[in-house]
Image: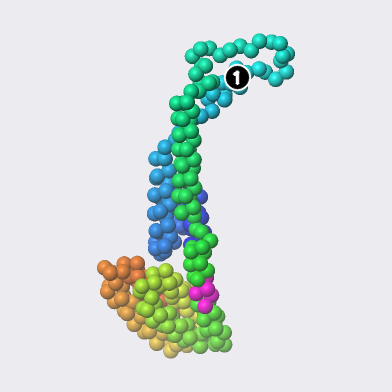
Amino acid sequence: MNCTVVQRRLLAAEQPDFPTAEIKSHLAQCPACRAWQRRLVQVERQIPLLPVPPSTRRAELLQRILGPVPGDVAHLPIAEPPNHWRHTLAPGPKERGLRKLSVAFALAASLLIFALAWWSWPHDNTTSSQGGARLAEQDKLEQRLRKVLLAEKPQDRILQLAGLAEEVHDEARGLVDNTEKLNQWADFYSRLVGKELLEQARQLPPAERLTVLEPVASRLGKTESKASHMAVDLKHTAPNSAASFDRIALAARRSERDLRALMRG
């Protein structure tokens, strides 16, 4: 589930502060969507506080009720409204001023609601530009993966996947100040070692697993150690970046464990 889908589902939700489990899972890994959800919840809480102007259509309604009925003969007298209604049907300058003020308040409230909704909705300018840049980066990562998977033998694909995972981790260390991109790199690393690498490892004949997988598992252990130390160093200064390195470390640890389980048969 990508950010656009999550944000649209939150916008359509009756209670965006209580998302579904699927959306919660995405929010736990995406700082940008968590910030977007907080803004949306603020909007939802502020809308009931907007002032609602009084109705300005009372006089028109009374005129329709008391006026001539279509189809009546023209000579029939038209009953005049009671005295206590006459000031409603013929408002004085003060009431006309109040009505204009009410209309102004209604217009201002409508504009405010529109502005809040516009602010919350993903726009075609900055948000779309960021989304386009993210898709472009993802496409580059996917091209690198496809190139690795072109290798003919499973053992070659495994070694190249391990090398690509290390490259992604090393690149992530230079993205500390770009949390959006760092989060994307952490996602890709987790997929590399948690899905792609394991799929190729399972294709190895059991007799070859120890020889091929042992050095890869050791490399994953080293990456897990580096990523864990990086997360600790960033915990107080850049908590969002630290969370990304925690995910990289967790993915490396789990993949090492699964590879060693395959080696044991």
Instruction: Identify which residue, 264 or 59, lies in the foreground.
Output: 59
Magenta segment, prevailing SS (helix, strand or loop): helix
Q: Which residues are magenta?
A: 135-140
Colour scheme: rainbow
Residue 258 at x, y percent in the picture: 41, 76
Residue at 26 percent of width and 68 percent of height: 236
Residue at 50 percent of width and 58 percent of height: 122
Residue at 34 percent of width and 82 percent of height: 222
Residue at 51 percent of width and 59 percent of height: 123
Q: Count neighbours of disc 1 (C-alpha within 10 A) and say few if under 14, some if 14 to 19, many if 20 or more.
A: few
Residue 73 position by quadrant: top right
Label 1, on which residue? 65
| Residue 60 sits above or below residue 240 on the image | above
Quadrant that contains the C terminus: bottom left
Image side of residue 86 versus residue 251, left or right: right
Residue 36 position by quadrant: bottom left
| Residue 34 sits above or below residue 160 on the image | above
Residue 262 at x, y percent in the picture: 44, 79
Instruction: Identify which residue, 54 or 167, lies in the foreground.
Output: 54
Image side of residue 83 versus residue 217, left or right: right
Query: Is residue 199 visible in this depiction of the protein?
Result: no
Residue 137 falls within the magenta-colored stretch:
yes
Residue 221 falls within the magenta-colored stretch:
no
Query: Is residue 241 visible in this depiction of the protein?
Result: yes
Residue 186 at x, y percent in the picture: 41, 73
Secondary-structure class at tag 1: helix
Residue 191 at x, y percent in the picture: 46, 73
Q: Which amino acid does the dot numbered 1 rest on?
A: Ile
Residue 167 position by quadrant: bottom left
Q: Number of numbered discs present?
A: 1
Instruction: Identify which residue, 145 or 106, lies in the foreground.
Output: 106
